[in-house]
Image (cartoon, helix red, strand yellow):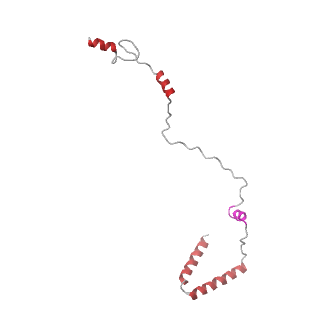
């Protein structure tokens, strides 16, 4: 493939050199036609009537009979991946917590700092 690329580059360079010279263009055209005739008689020409399947098989190889496409992998969602707790579950968590018990009066629901009995004694 590289030789074809080099040949095309040289051909374009040659055309750019003689493009303003009518006599040079005619001479170049005659040389190309002469070479074409020489190569067409000695070489076997490739037919352009090949089907696309046969060209594909020549280029890649035999086409597969069965194409298998797997489903895509599941994408992971963005975020911190922390589970959200519902209201019911939150209420159950609060019920599990130990209720405070006052060390002064022994009642539940408050501690010694917020004890009403202690505040009554202080005011008296």
Residues in magenta?
51-60
- Residue 43 included in the magenta stretch of the image: no
Q: From the viewer's perspective, is residue 104 above or below residue 34?
A: above
Q: How many circles with numbers are drawn on the protein?
A: 0
Q: Which of the pair 36/114 is nearer the observer?
A: 114
Q: Residue at x 70, y 61 (%)?
A: 61
Q: From the viewer's perspective, is residue 49 above or below residue 90?
A: below
Coordinates of residue 113 in the picture (x, y in percent): 33, 18
Coordinates of residue 42 in the picture (x, y in percent): 72, 79
64 with respect to 4 (left or right):
right
6 with respect to 44 (left or right):
left
Q: Which of the pair 105/88 is nearer the observer?
A: 88
Q: From the viewer's perspective, is residue 18 above or below residue 92?
A: below
Coordinates of residue 48 in the picture (x, y in percent): 71, 71
Q: Quadrant of the C terminus?
A: top left
Q: From the viewer's perspective, is residue 20 above or below residue 5?
A: below
- Residue 59 included in the magenta stretch of the image: yes
Q: Residue at x 58, y 78 (%)?
A: 11
Which residue appears farthest toward the bottom when viewing the image? Answer: 23
Say which quarter of the image contains residue 43: bottom right
Q: Residue at x 48, y 21 (%)?
A: 95
Say which quarter of the image contains residue 123: top left
Q: Residue at x 55, y 87 (%)?
A: 21
97 with respect to 15 (left or right):
left
* Dominant SS type (magenta): helix
């Amino acid at each position: 493939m590289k030789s074809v690329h080099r040949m095309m580059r040289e051909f374009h360079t040659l055309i750019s050199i003689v493009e303003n010279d009518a006599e040079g263009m005619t001479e170049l055209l005659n040389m190309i036609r002469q070479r074409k005739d020489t190569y067409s008689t000695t070489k076997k020409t490739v037919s352009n009537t090949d089907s696309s399947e046969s060209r594909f098989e020549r280029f890649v190889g035999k086409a597969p009979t069965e194409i298998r496409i797997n489903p895509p992998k599941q994408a992971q969602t963005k975020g911190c991946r922390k589970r959200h707790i519902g209201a019911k579950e939150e209420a159950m968590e609060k019920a599990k917590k130990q209720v405070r018990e006052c060390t002064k009066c022994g009642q539940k629901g408050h501690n010694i700092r917020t004890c009403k009995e202690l505040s009554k004694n202080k005011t008296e």
